[in-house]
Image (cartoon, grey):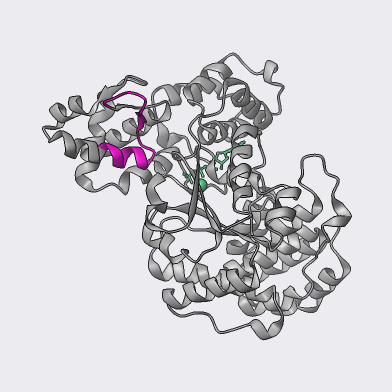
């Protein structure tokens, strides 16, 4: 969709102010993750000598782009707290009416794209494979929020595709129209401290207030308590039928700030987070990884091949990736750059050289070992040591807590508590159909364990 005239003229009108003030490098990071700017385009701008040159080039590019890019640029300004500049551009944010556009076969109509762009929901990754079963499970739970507020938790281990699935689940015309006509508001959380959390909520409140009449603009809330109350008011009174997506929550204290009787979808590696908040709760576990066919599809898409035309190492690479979308996409992106390295990357995977498996992308961690180590680093130090001991477990071998009680020389009850913590944090699986419960490492968790013992050796 070409850039609307109003949006184009607002860029031209405020061009001078934008060029004076913006820092393009930060804004472009957000725009890349929204999929409206390519890495090549960003590099061309980033290599220009001064900040001002970069700003001029970015504005030039925006004028040649479309409505979605304008919305993404506006959202980046909000995220980087350029509130005054965002206000200038707000009046001409492109809008589409739902009824006029309902014909795309996969439910992702221009109306959906606009709602999601406005709410800051990330685009699909450039290479994307569908996971209909999980997406439908999440949608089914979201439909239950139609009647009453509550929480849908999508949980699973590092890089299992939770954030991509959450964004995909709301990419649906009927779901938005029937359940969340007030909009979908995405907030990336991650591991942050209270001041940073406050800044994020301030930006969200600003975005929500901008969508209303101008009298609703207030000064930013200046404490977390105030931010919580402001958000409660906005979600309850001004956006009553909207969905808040909290991506990548680590801390139940953070979640309590959002305990405001709203409709919330959250992604986390920690299953037990919602224990501390009230209301209806639903869960979707992202347990199974991608199968071989989908894995080959990812490698083929990255390397511009057909799945059956891939070299013979492809199957072994997919097997070593243990179904992880993250690992497959990291390897795929590397092979795109260096198409003659199939053997090399297979060897790196077999030798568990995770530090070498890195790429630049919108994913939060640069390298595979960092993504996984983050889960282990939030354990108390003494539990990190115990987790490292689990490297003795072979994949899918199931053991009762009693065995570990001998290994660790701890009371069985204490061992059960520790194992429950590992399970809740997606570091271990439990078979509850067996009494006593049996614990086991599954696929990539064996890799995580190896990462943890390696990081202690360094
Ligand atoms: N359906 C998919 N198709 C293609 N690639 C995918 C898909 N899902 C995930 N990926 C790839 O895996 C990466 C990690 O996915 P995602 O960020 O959703 O994981 P996550 O479970 O949210 O991880 P974390 O626990 O670190 O937040 C993405 O950046 C993307 O490259
Ligand atoms: Mg995530």
Residue 8 located left or right of residue 363: right
Q: Quadrant of the C terminus?
A: top left
Q: Nearer the viewer, residue 134 or 191?
A: 134
Looking at the figure, which quarter contains the N terminus? bottom right
Q: Quadrant of residue 86?
A: bottom right
Q: Position of residue 344 (x, y in %)?
A: 49, 23
Was residue 430 drawn as part of the magenta stretch in this picture?
Answer: yes
Determine the image quadrant of residue 426.
Answer: top left
Residue found at x 54% / y 34%:
325
Q: Residue at x 86, y 65 (%)?
A: 4
Query: Total marks drawn?
Result: 0
- The residue furthest top is 312
Image coordinates of residue 440 in percent, x first then y, are: 33, 26
Q: Is residue 345 left or right of residue 276?
A: right
The answer to which quarter of the image holds residue 56 is bottom right
Residue numbers of the magenta segment: 419-436
Residue 53 among those drawn in magenta:
no
Q: Position of residue 99 (x, y in %)?
A: 86, 56
Q: Residue at x 71, y 24 (%)?
A: 305
Can residue 419 be seen here? The reply is: yes
In the image, is residue 90 above or below residue 245? below
From the viewer's perspective, tell me whether residue 12 is left or right of residue 434: right
Residue found 50% across the figure and 79% down from its top: 221
Query: Residue 220, relative to residue 122: is it above or below?
Result: below
Q: Is residue 41 above or below residue 161?
A: below
């Amino acid at each position: 969709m070409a850039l609307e005239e109003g949006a184009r003229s607002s860029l031209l009108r405020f061009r001078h102010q934008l060029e004076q003030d913006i820092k393009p490098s930060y804004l472009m990071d957000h725009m890349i993750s929204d999929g409206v700017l390519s890495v090549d385009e960003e590099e061309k701008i980033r290599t220009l000598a001064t900040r001002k040159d970069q700003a001029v080039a970015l504005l030039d590019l925006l004028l040649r782009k479309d409505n979605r890019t304008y919305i993404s640029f506006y959202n980046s300004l909000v995220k980087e707290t350029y509130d005054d500049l965002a206000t200038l551009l707000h009046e001409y944010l492109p809008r589409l009416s739902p009824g006029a556009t309902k014909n795309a076969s996969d439910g992702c109509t221009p109306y959906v794209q606009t709602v999601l762009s406005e709410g800051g929901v990330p685009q699909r990754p450039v290479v994307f494979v569908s996971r209909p079963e999980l997406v439908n499970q999440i949608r089914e739970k979201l439909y239950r929020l139609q009647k009453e507020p509550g929480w849908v938790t999508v949980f699973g281990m590092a890089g299992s595709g939770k954030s991509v699935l959450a964004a995909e689940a709301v990419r649906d015309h009927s779901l938005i129209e029937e359940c969340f006509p007030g909009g979908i508001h995405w907030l990336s959380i991650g591991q942050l401290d209270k001041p940073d959390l406050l800044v994020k909520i301030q930006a969200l409140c600003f975005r929500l207030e901008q969508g209303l009449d101008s009298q609703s603009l207030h000064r930013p809330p200046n404490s977390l308590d105030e931010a919580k109350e402001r958000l409660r008011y906005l979600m309850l009174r001004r956006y009553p039928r909207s969905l808040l997506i909290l991506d990548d929550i680590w801390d139940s204290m953070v979640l309590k700030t959002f305990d405001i009787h709203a409709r919330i979808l959250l992604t986390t590696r920690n299953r037990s987070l919602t224990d501390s908040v009230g209301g209806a709760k639903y869960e979707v576990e992202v347990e199974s990884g991608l199968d071989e066919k989908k894995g080959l599809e990812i490698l083929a898409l990255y390397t511009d091949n057909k799945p059956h035309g891939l070299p013979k190492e492809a199957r072994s690479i997919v097997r070593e990736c243990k179904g992880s979308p993250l690992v497959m996409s990291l390897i795929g992106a590397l092979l795109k750059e260096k198409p003659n390295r199939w053997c090399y990357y297979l060897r790196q995977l077999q030798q568990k050289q995770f530090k070498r498996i890195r790429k630049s992308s919108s994913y939060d961690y640069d390298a595979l070992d960092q993504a996984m180590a983050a889960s282990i680093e939030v354990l108390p130090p003494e539990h990190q040591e115990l987790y490292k001991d689990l490297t003795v477990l072979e994949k899918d071998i199931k053991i009762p807590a009693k065995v570990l009680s001998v290994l660790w020389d701890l009371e069985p009850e204490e061992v059960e508590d520790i194992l429950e913590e590992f399970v809740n944090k997606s570091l271990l699986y439990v078979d509850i159909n067996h009494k006593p419960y049996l614990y086991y490492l599954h696929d990539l968790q064996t890799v995580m364990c190896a990462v943890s013992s390696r990081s202690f050796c360094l």
